[in-house]
Image (spheres, grey):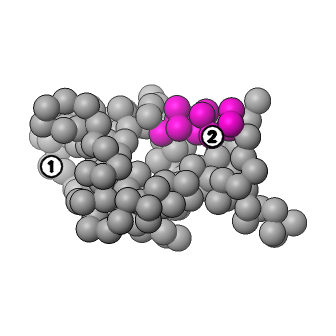
Amino acid sequence: SWLSQGFYFMGVGMNRDVRVNTKSLLYRWGQWASRDGMSRLDYPPMSAEQMDHIKIHEGDFPTEQRVEEALTELGRFDDLALQATKLYYTEDKETGGMLSWDEVADRLKCGKKRIKAAHDFTIGFVASALRDLVSN
């Protein structure tokens, strides 16, 4: 039903394994997306010379590309969730390591609770979009 689908999207009642598997896909996507020092999601047009340097190969990373498609779709519904996800999973601190949720909230100029709620929405949305990859 529509109502149960909505709850699934928000991550309510989502089993722990699905949540863990979805986060794992997002971490993998983040590593892939930030390779070569750039995020592939919404990247600016590049010259042929730049494309040559980066070596993007269509179809080489089908799982990561499916995650990216789900995130692109997510951005149509919730831009904050998309921006928070991109920052959290693809940005590295200058000192190494990922940004904390507090740092993501600071960069997006909103509260940590709102960022965490946006992340929960992302988890539910991606889990629903990639059900075949995250369900046991």
> Is residue 66 placed above or below 69 in the rendered structure?
above
Q: Position of residue 11 (x, y in %)?
A: 66, 53
Which residue is rendered at x = 61% and y = 33% of the image? 21
| Of the pair 39 and 46, the residue shown nearer to us | 39
Which residue is rendered at x = 23% and y = 38% of the image? 92
Mark 1, residue position: 47
Where does the C terminus fall, quadrant-wise?
top right
Secondary structure, magenta segment, majority class: helix
Residue 89 is marked as: none
| Of the pair 6 and 40, the residue shown nearer to us | 6
Which residue is rendered at x = 51% and y = 60% of the image? 117
For mark 2, does the 10 Å Cα neighbourhood hold few (<14), some (14 to 19), or many (20 or more) residues? some
Q: Could you tell me how far apart the alpha carbons at marks 2 and 1 are, in whole angstroms?
A: 39 Å
Left or right position of 96 against 43: left
Instruction: Tell me if residue 6 can be seen.
Output: yes
The type of residue carrying mark 2 is Arg
Count of numbered circles on the image: 2
Where does the N terminus fall, quadrant-wise?
bottom right
Q: Which residues are magenta?
A: 16-26
Dot 1: what SS?
Answer: loop
> Is residue 102 placed above or below 90 in the rendered structure?
below
Residue 19 is marked as: 2
Q: Position of residue 34 (x, y in %)?
A: 29, 38
State which quadrant residue 105 falls in.
bottom left
The type of residue carrying mark 1 is Ser
Which residue is rendered at x = 52% and y = 32% of the image? 24
